[in-house]
Amino acid sequence: MRTFTQLSITLLLFLAMSITAMDASAQQKRSGNPSPQAQATGTPASPQSQTAAAQKGPKPYKEVITDKAKTTKGLFTVHKVEDKFYFELADSIMKREFIAITRYAKTSTGAGFGGEIVNQAVLYFEKGPENKILLRTSLVVNMAADPTQPLAQAVENSNLDPIVAAFDIKALGKDSTSVVIDVTDFFKSENAVITMSNDAKTQYKLGSPQSDRVFIESIRSYPINTEVKVSKTFSINTAPSGSSTTRVGAERPLPATEAGVATFEFNISMLLLPKTPMHRRAFDARVGYFADSYTSFDENKQGSKKETFAVRWRLEPKPQDVEKMKRGELVEPKKPIVYYIDPATPKKWRKYLIQGIEDWNVAFEQAGFKNAVRAYEWPEKDSTMSLEDARYSVVRYFAADIENAYGPNVHDPRSGEIIESHIGWYNDVIKRLYKWYLIQTATIDPRAHNKEYDDELMGQLMRYVVCHEVGHTLGLRHNFAASAAMPVEKLRDKEFISKYGQSASIMDYSRFNYVAQPGDGITQLIPRISVYDKWAIEWGYKPILDAKDDKAEKLELNKWVRSHESDKMYLFGTESSPYDPRFQSEDLGDNAMKAGEYGIKNLKLILPHLIEWTKEDGEDYTDLATMYGELTAQFSRYMGHAAKNVGGVYETSKTYDMPGGQFEVVPRATQKEAVTFLTKNVFTTPAWLLDKDIMSRISHTGGLEVITPIQ
């Protein structure tokens, strides 16, 4: 039996503990933190925390994807429930790589054009801890040659793919072979893999997105891709940067500055990449292809190796046609290369763009394929197709006063396989073509004397440009050696021009035949696909069906290159050589001095007619000044072409099995010829350029500012 004293002590201890507990509970209520007891025992301190804990795990499928859901199935099953968007990811799609291509769908004035790429990244989903789905970006930089080697683990340990987003699993699929995640906030966000770069935002002086004006317009899913369209409104930073190091012209305020905001529509195409990458074709510097690369680690080799491979489309014969191809018969590819014409393109130009695209078929025939390249007008009545959909390659027409066009491609960085291309075609490229053609060919073609060209002539000029740009989308780089393959005098030979054209490649910047003289009878003045183009397509696309391995294929390709090594028409010349006079832009022929003399003869005939060919009642002399500027720029080019020979060095890419060295000084006689040409034509003042009738209309100095910069 306890004594009174023992009972008193026990009671006092109990009261003390109770008071302590009540005090702790009061503190918890004031601070919002759980009591020590709750922390120690894991017991929730309130009904609210019990609810929060229950919400952490996946919910039943029907509670997330309710009867109100609008569902589309494809690469990712997409559910829209009221204002929320969910992806249902099958287990089979985990760790499957896809490329996310972000484009402008619509832009604010002055900030690019709808259809242009602003971002791309290779991504994949994987299951993570704590009921999370992780989105990683795949950095194809270092790879193990054989994933079964122990060295592969070292490669993996040093090349962890970044996690760019993490999603809570909201529910498991009906059959537990998929998971549901909420992607609403992700696509509204400024995540680096799905929005414009910080440099672009700085250039246009964009601030933060306005959260109340960021909307997901739509998410549609197709068999191998899912398309997301997002509208975002950004604030515009009107305050000066205040930095003394800001580059002049780096920031370009938009016309929307007065509104204080700028709105953009973005389209994000997520396109599934092949489970097994396309077979890579080893890059060869002697053939002009764009390339990609990674560092390969192989424990059977002494040291790592940079694997560089050509960028090209996957073009394969149908299984039943392989034997036909081996016999030399032309076969249609399993999957042709298809381009569409933007419905915004004026109808009168569409047929010429289609012709320019399909002109490449003659080159693919040399690679063993017929009807390999096809072009169609966009099926405007088909509501299931989108111009931003990465499954379709499109010639996009931009309403812009830019005198240019460009031909990009999107490719799989693992293999170089081209996925698609959106060629950019600016409305005012027409102006550039008009200027070039008049200044370079007006002595030969009377159609160039008009202030506007007829549709047939302009259509043929456009056909040439789109053909060149499509060449880039097929993987081909500029080949500035191609024009230097042609003997200058042969550019006045009607038979030669009819057979070969004025350059060995349409991928050169040879423009139009300014060497041809009146009376030569030359009518083919526009570049077209020629010897090098056919050869380059053969090298890149002809299947080597019997090669045992990569090394055997590379040796076979080397034989192909060496079989043409003494023929200048097969030479590839980089677009960026600072010292090889054969590799120049806007030139013609194998001797810049001889070609320049012919070009100057034509300019002297054109100059007196500029007033007549540019006049229009009621208009000022702006067009005359523009065309005079074009003529003097053309003259300046001829001087530059010759000058590059002085101190020049020829660079010819070679392999160990080829004779001779790669570098050779330009012959002394050629250098002396160049100096003589420059002395005669520019250092002796070219007074013929200072036409008094023209100068009195466009220059208050009489033309003093024209010649000095050229000299």
Image (spheres, rainbow, N blue to C red):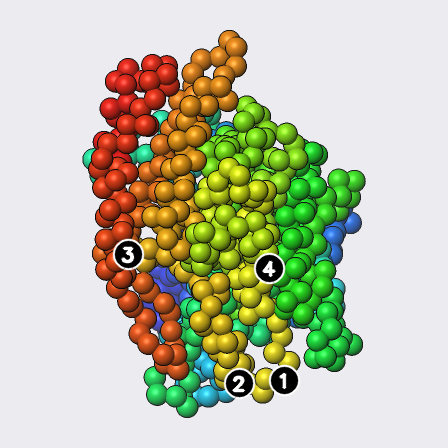
Kind of residue at badge 1? Asp
Q: Mark 4 Cα within 10 Å, few/some/many (few <14, many 20+)?
A: some
Q: Are marks 3 and 4 in contact (CB under 8 Å)?
A: no
- Classify residue 313 by image quadrant: bottom right
> Residue 498: percent from the left, percent from the top?
60, 52
Asked whether 346 or 495 is in front, the reply is 495
- Crowd band around label 1 with a 10 angstrom C-alpha radius: few (<14), some (14–19), many (20+): few
**In which quadrant is the N terminus drawn?**
bottom left
Q: Which mark is residue 489?
A: none
Q: Is residue 453 positioned above or below 268 on the image?
A: above
Task: Give the mark, 1 or 4, whose residue is nearer the N terminus.
Answer: 4
Q: Is residue 345 left or right of residue 157?
A: right
As measured in the structure, the alpha-carbon distance from the residue carrying label 3 to the one carrying label 4 is 46 Å
- Mark 2, other Cα within 10 Å: few <14 / some 14–19 / many ≥20: few
**Rendering coords of residue 649 (x, y %):** 28, 61
Residue at x 31% of width, y 48% of height: 642
Task: Find disc 4 in the rendering and name its residue.
Answer: 419
Q: Are marks 3 and 2 in contact (CB under 8 Å)?
A: no
Residue ID for mark 1: 546
Numbered tag placed on residue 552 in the rendering = 2
Report which residue position mark 3 lands on: 670
Residue 425 visible from this viewpoint: yes
Residue at the location (50% across, 16% down)?
615
